[in-house]
Image (spheres, helix red, strand yellow):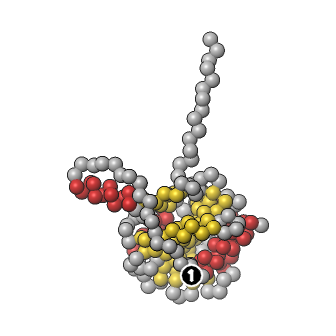
Amino acid sequence: MGAMRMLGWGVLLLSTACGASRTAVTKAEPGTGGSGMVSDEAAVASTTRRYVDEDLGFEIIRPTAEWQLDETNERTPEGLAIPVILRHRVTGAQVVLQVAPGVATPVQFAERLTQGLRQQPGFTTTDPQPIALSDNAVGFDFQVGEGVRGKVAVREGNSGRVLMMLATWPTEATAGITESVDALMAGVRPLPEPSVAVRSTPRTP
C-alpha cells in the first residue's frame, strides 16, 4: 500500500508545479591537481558541478553550469525523499529527483507512474522502455497538452533504494535541451556500496 501512496506523490509532482525550494548549496568534492591552467580549470569545473548526498547514497554530476541545483530536503510520511530540484537557467527545463524505498522494482515504479499519469487530464505518455542508465533502468516520455514535454527515468539506488528522475521542459525549448536532460540524468548515480572487509580464516598448519 505504501508503494501506491509514494507513486501518488510522483504523479502529483509531475502534474503540479513544484513548491519553492531553498537556494542550492553545492557540495563540491576536492579536485586532484593537474598540470597547466587549462587542466586545473577543467578539474575545478568538474568538481564544483558534483553534488554528493551520502545519507541517501547518490551523486549528481551536472553536464554544464547552466543547471542550477536547489536542495529541498523534503520527505513524505511514506519515506519518499525529494532531496534536490535542478533547473536549467536558459530553457526553463526542470528535473526533480526522488529517492524511494525499494518497495517495487524500477519497472514496476515506471509502469505504475505511467498508469497514474494517463489518468490525469491532458497527459499522454509512451510505454516504459529499458534505457541505458543501468542494466535495469527504465524510462518513458510524456506530454502535457501542447505546452510541456518531459520524461521519467527510474533506476536502482544503493541500500535497497530506487532513484526516480522527473524532467519537464517547455515545448518551445531548443532541440538541444533533450540531450542536456539526458546528460544530466546520466550523471545521477548511486554511490558505491560500502565495502565489507572479509577476514580470512587462518589456515590450519
Instruction: Say which residue appears at 39% left-offset and 74% top-offset.
Output: 176
Q: Is residue 41 visible?
A: yes
Q: How many marks are shown on the rendered structure?
A: 1
104 on left or right of 72: right
Instruction: Say which residue appears at 22% left-offset and 52% top-offset.
Output: 36
Helix, strand or loop at label 1? It is loop
151 on left or right of 39: right
Instruction: Say which residue appears at 60% left-offset and 26% top-offset.
Output: 200
In percent of width and height, residue 178 lies at: 45, 73
| Label 1 crowd bin: few (<14), some (14–19), many (20+), radius 10 Å | few
Q: Amino acid at mark 1?
A: Ala
Instruction: Say which residue appears at 59% left-offset and 77% top-offset.
Output: 14
In percent of width and height, residue 12 lies at: 64, 78
191 or 169: nearer the viewer: 191
* Quadrant housing residue 98: bottom right
128 or 112: nearer the viewer: 112
Q: Give the residue pinned by disc 1.
A: 17
